Image (cartoon, rainbow, N blue to C red):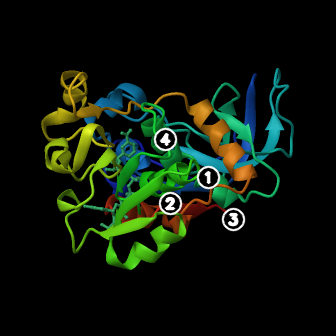
Amino acid sequence: MKAAIRSKYGGPDVLSIAQLPIPVPGKNEVLIKVKVATVNRTDCAILTAKPFIMRLFTGLLKPKLPSTGTDFAGIIEAVGKGVSNFATGDRVWGFHDNGLGSHSEYMVLNVRKPIVKMPEGVSFIDAAASAEGSHYALNFLNKVSIHSDHRVLVNGATGAIGSAMVQLLKKDGVYVTATADTDSIDKIKRIGADRVIDYLKEDFTRDHQEYDFILDTVGKSTFEKCRPIMNKKAVYISSELGPNMQNPILALTTKNKDHRVVFPVPTDIPHSMSTMNTLLEAGKFHPLIDRRYRLDDIKEAFNYVESGEKKGNVIIVMD
Ligand SMILES: NC(=O)c1ccc[n+]([C@@H]2O[C@H](COP(=O)([O-])OP(=O)(O)OC[C@H]3O[C@@H](n4cnc5c(N)ncnc54)[C@H](OP(=O)(O)O)[C@@H]3O)[C@@H](O)[C@H]2O)c1
């Protein structure tokens, strides 16, 4: 089988495609034939070990897992002893933000990892692309209580997190203002945004509208810049630590202030997957898909994702 492997941290050039034996599942493990994976911003952080804190989870001096890849959709090819909840032929998808090694044609996973069966009728591409960005978007939303009468701004609606965020808010009837580049305005309206500000032409922090929640899914703004457009009791949430790691600190110091920062520490992957499974099954979530690559071209995929220009999700198709 082919797998993307590396033995040290670094840029996409540390990756190579190797021919390896198909692994054999041990006790409580399943063998998965990966059909689709994505290359996402978490994969880039794991590949490069940046920020440094990633190393606490992925290996201090060198990567614990030879293969990259945090998400997948595929088919169970074999089950090990003790596995009762999965059977050969099951269509499954999964995600873990410390990496699973899914940039590989086959992989073995312990069934304690977040793996769920795919709903009927959902494609491998849609399942894999509903993992990483959606999990982080859900982890903004589960830290606060947003109702349909709130005014919400999503900064960076073309990202994996932002494009999931717009759809998750719209399913709850929230009026969403989003930012996007000129060429993506129609695309972002099609996924549900009520109003789109062209960030290349307008600075959203000078908007005439005030908001109850500013969800900075690309972490390109700051709490201070957003304050002029924040209503009393409004909340700012960013996907990034912010300049000088200010966002987690501000989350502590603004707790009882009129304008608050909430830091969205991502937790509970199984709950995110179960939520996304329900939405996918009901046809209420359609991940934004960008380029598709073959596993052989994974370096190119990483280079594109690292550019910060992807629109939604970048797909690796194994076959
Ligand atoms: N906290 C966490 O655990 C965690 C996990 C994953 C990711 N992240 C971080 O979250 C951020 C977003 O991740 P993602 O995967 O959603 O990003 P992404 O898919 O790489 O998307 C970036 C998108 O944002 C757009 N963009 C760039 N600058 C913008 C700006 N100033 N205003 C509006 N849109 C802008 C880009 O469009 P253009 O092409 O027009 O520039 C691109 O479409 C990244 O910085 C990532 O490092 C954090």
Q: Secondary structure at mark 3?
A: loop
Q: Which residue has dot 1 on it?
A: 128
* C-beta proximity under 8 Å, tags 2 and 1: yes
**Label 3 to label 2, Cα distance in Å?**
18 Å
Give the mark toward the camera: 1 or 3: 1
Q: Which residue has dot 2 on it?
A: 313
Residue plotted at (58% across, 55% down): 129
Quadrant (top left, top right, bottom left, bottom right) of the C terminus: bottom right
Q: Nearer the viewer, residue 221 or 291?
A: 221
**Is disc 1 surrounded by few (<14), some (14 to 19) or many (20+) residues within 10 Å?**
many
* C-beta proximity under 8 Å, tags 1 and 3: no
**Label 2 to label 1, Cα distance in Å?**
9 Å
Where residue 313 sits in the image (x, y, percent)?
50, 60
Question: How many marks do you count on the picture?
Answer: 4
Q: Which residue has dot 4 on it?
A: 147
Residue plotted at (36% across, 50% down): 217
**Is disc 4 surrounded by few (<14), some (14 to 19) or many (20+) residues within 10 Å?**
few
Label 2 CB-ligand 1 distance < 8 A: yes
Q: Is residue 43 visible?
A: yes
Q: Secondary structure at mark 1?
A: helix
Q: Secondary structure at mark 2?
A: strand
